[in-house]
C-alpha cells in the first residue's frame, strides 16, 4: 500500500454524560483568552485564573464592606476589570458578587475561601489543596495527589452544603466539614475520607 493510500477510519462513540462532564471541567480550567487579567470582578463573579507555570497560594476574604481581597503569597497578581492593586494583594468590588471562581492551573497550589460566598475551586495538574468557605462550595481536583497524603487533608469543605469531586485517579484526603455535603470519589482505599463529615459518598 502506498504512503498516500487512505487508512480506514475508526469511529469512537463517547457517552453523553462523559462529554458533558469533560465540557464542564474544561470550562473551569481553561483561562479566558479574551480577558487581559488574572483577577476580575464582574457579572456576579470574582474570578481568579492562574498563569501557567506559577505556584499559587491564594486566599479570598472580605477586606471591608463591599470589597473583597485576593492574596497570593507565592505569586504576583494582575488586577483586571473591577479590581485594583498589584503584587501579592488585589482588592475587588464585592457588591453584586455571588460566587468566587478559582482555576489553579498546573503546579502544587492552594486555594482558600475565607468568605461566606459560594465558590468553585478547581485544582489542575499538581498536588493541590482546596479549602471551601462558609457557603455552598464546589471543590474539584482533576488529577489528585500522586501518592497517599497520609497527613495532608487535600480537600476541606468547611461550612455550607458542599460538593466535592475527587474522582480523578489520584490520592486525596477529604474533610467535608459541616452542612449536608456530597462527595464523588475514587474507590477505597485510594481516597481517604475523614469519618462522619460527608453525608453522601459516591464511589465508582
Image (tube, rainbow, N blue to C red):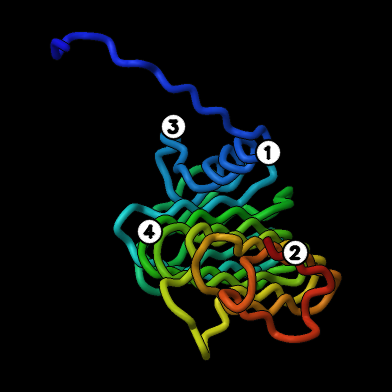
Question: Is residue 53 found left or right of 26 in the rendered image?
Answer: left
* Label 4 sits on residue: 106
**Residue 202: mark:** 2
Nearest-to-viewer mark from 1 and 4? 1
The disc at residue 99 is none
Q: Position of residue 53 (x, y in %)?
A: 29, 58
Circle 3 residue: 34
How packed mark 4 is, by other alpha carbons closer than 10 Å (few <14, some 14-19, many 20 or more), is: many
Q: Position of residue 14 (x, y in %)?
A: 58, 32
**Residue for badge 1:** 17
> Viewer-nearest of labels 3 and 2?
2
Does dot 4 land on a helix, a strand or a loop? loop
Task: Note whether 77 is above or below 200 in the view shown.
Answer: above
**Pointer 3 or 4: first along the chain:** 3
Q: Earlier in the sequence, mark 1 or mark 4?
A: 1
Is residue 63 among what the camera can see? no
In the rendered image of this protein, does residue 62 appear above or below residue 18? Answer: below
Amino acid at each position: 500500500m502506498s504512503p498516500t493510500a487512505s487508512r480506514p477510519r475508526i469511529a469512537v462513540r463517547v457517552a453523553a454524560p462523559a462529554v458533558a462532564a469533560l465540557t464542564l471541567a474544561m470550562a473551569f480550567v481553561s483561562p479566558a483568552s479574551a480577558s487581559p487579567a488574572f483577577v476580575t470582578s464582574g457579572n456576579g463573579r470574582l474570578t481568579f485564573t492562574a498563569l501557567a507555570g506559577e505556584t499559587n497560594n491564594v486566599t479570598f476574604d472580605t477586606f471591608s464592606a463591599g470589597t473583597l481581597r485576593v492574596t497570593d503569597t507565592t505569586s504576583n497578581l494582575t488586577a483586571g476589570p473591577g479590581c485594583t492593586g498589584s503584587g501579592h494583594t488585589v482588592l475587588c468590588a464585592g457588591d453584586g458578587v455571588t460566587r468566587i471562581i478559582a482555576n489553579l492551573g498546573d503546579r502544587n497550589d492552594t486555594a482558600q475561601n475565607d468568605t461566606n460566598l459560594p465558590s468553585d475551586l478547581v485544582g489542575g495538574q499538581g498536588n493541590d489543596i482546596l479549602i471551601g468557605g462558609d457557603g455552598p462550595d464546589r471543590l474539584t481536583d482533576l488529577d489528585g495527589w500522586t501518592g497517599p497524603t497520609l497527613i495532608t487533608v487535600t480537600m476541606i469543605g468547611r461550612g455550607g452544603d458542599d460538593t466535592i469531586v475527587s474522582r480523578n485517579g489520584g490520592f486525596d484526603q477529604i474533610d467535608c466539614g459541616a452542612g449536608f455535603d456530597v462527595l464523588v470519589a475514587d474507590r477505597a482505599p485510594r481516597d481517604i475520607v475523614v469519618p462522619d463529615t460527608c453525608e453522601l459518598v459516591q464511589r465508582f
